[in-house]
Image (cartoon, grey):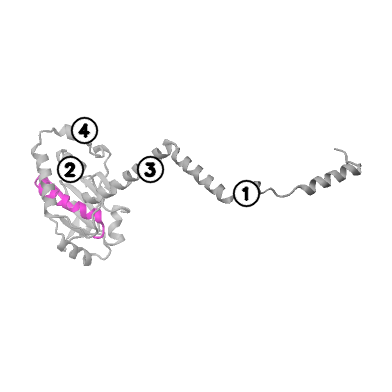
């Protein structure tokens, strides 16, 4: 718009501007505004979509699923306390279970093997186990040739290893049940303090199988690196490694493997 040069127009504009002033009715009312905002937020909560509540319920259920296995494992003894010891009742239960399997439980051996197939290396692909000479508890030397013609369970363990402790009652049961068929367990401790810690440990937790010591690098060298405990080898009657279990063994699987090796021809 072009500027106005008429003095009368300028005067009229000035007079109109002078009459303008604050209008009390248009002043902001803070209290009224807060009240309206609060009322609107309450309405929004009441109208919150159903999907939001479903997400919250799903999150709580997911958290419960995560927590349940930990609690359940603790209750069932899978997460044993550091000082927990295998009881005689547990050992007896293992012996009874293995004996029942040997005697026959109404389920054929073929059916049990199909349910949980052993992981044995095919005979033609097996390699000879390394020879070794390790001191045992009695002061003699344990060697591979001591077990010629037998199935050998060679278990590497340590006194501080909790899964190793869990396996020991099972190996006690295996020694009892299968010894007459040409089976033996040899526990090889890798505790670096040696007999100073192994002997007191076994006095508190006696076993019925032979214990030897591989507490130095030289004594462990024939077996290669043993980085995870427990580690368990099964050696067949001809002195060849039939399978290796790293970590806590599956009791049912290793029972089937032992029985299969015992049934193999030499």
From the image, which quarter does the C terminus lie in?
top left
Q: Earlier in the sequence, mark 2 or mark 3?
A: 3
- Residue for point 29% across, 57% down: 220
Tell me the chief SS of the magenta region. helix
User: In this figure, which residue is indicated by the disc labeled 2?
Assistant: 255
Tell me the number on the disc at residue 28: 1
Secondary structure under the numbered disc 4 in the rendered image: helix
User: In this figure, which residue is indicated by the disc labeled 3?
Assistant: 59
User: In this figure, which residue is indicated by the disc labeled 4?
Assistant: 114
The foreground one among 195 and 148 is 195
Residue 132: image location, x then y, percent = 24, 55
- Residue for point 25% across, 43% down: 243
Q: Earlier in the sequence, mark 3 or mark 1?
A: 1
Q: Are marks 3 and 1 in contact (CB under 8 Å)?
A: no
Badge 3, how many Cα within 10 Å: few under 14, some, many 20+? Answer: few
The foreground one among 153 and 197 is 197
């Amino acid at each position: 718009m072009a500027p106005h040069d008429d003095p009368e127009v300028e005067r009229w504009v000035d007079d109109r501007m002078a009459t303008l002033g604050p209008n009390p009715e248009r002043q902001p009312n803070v209290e009224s505004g807060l009240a309206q905002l609060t009322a609107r937020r309450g309405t929004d909560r009441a109208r919150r979509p159903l999907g939001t509540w479903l997400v919250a319920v799903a999150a709580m259920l997911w958290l419960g699923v995560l927590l349940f296995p930990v609690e359940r494992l603790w209750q069932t003894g899978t997460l044993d306390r550091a000082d927990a010891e295998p009881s005689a009742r547990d050992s007896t239960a293992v012996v009874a279970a293995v004996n029942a399997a040997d005697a026959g439980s109404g389920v054929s051996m073929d059916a049990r093997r199909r349910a949980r197939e052993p992981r044995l290396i095919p005979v033609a692909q097996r390699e000879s186990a390394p020879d070794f000479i390790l001191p045992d508890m009695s002061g003699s030397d344990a060697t591979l040739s001591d077990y010629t013609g037998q199935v050998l369970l060679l278990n590497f363990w340590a006194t501080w290893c909790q899964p190793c402790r869990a396996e020991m009652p099972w190996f006690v049961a295996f020694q009892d049940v299968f010894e007459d068929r040409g089976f033996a367990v040899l526990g090889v401790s890798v505790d670096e303090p040696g007999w100073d810690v192994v002997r007191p440990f076994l006095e508190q937790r006696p076993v019925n199988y032979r214990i030897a010591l591989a507490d130095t690098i030289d004594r462990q060298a024939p077996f290669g690196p043993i980085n995870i405990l427990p580690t368990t080898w099964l050696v067949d009657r001809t002195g060849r490694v039939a399978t290796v279990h790293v970590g806590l063994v599956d009791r049912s699987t290793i029972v089937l493997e032992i029985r299969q090796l015992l049934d193999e021809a030499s």
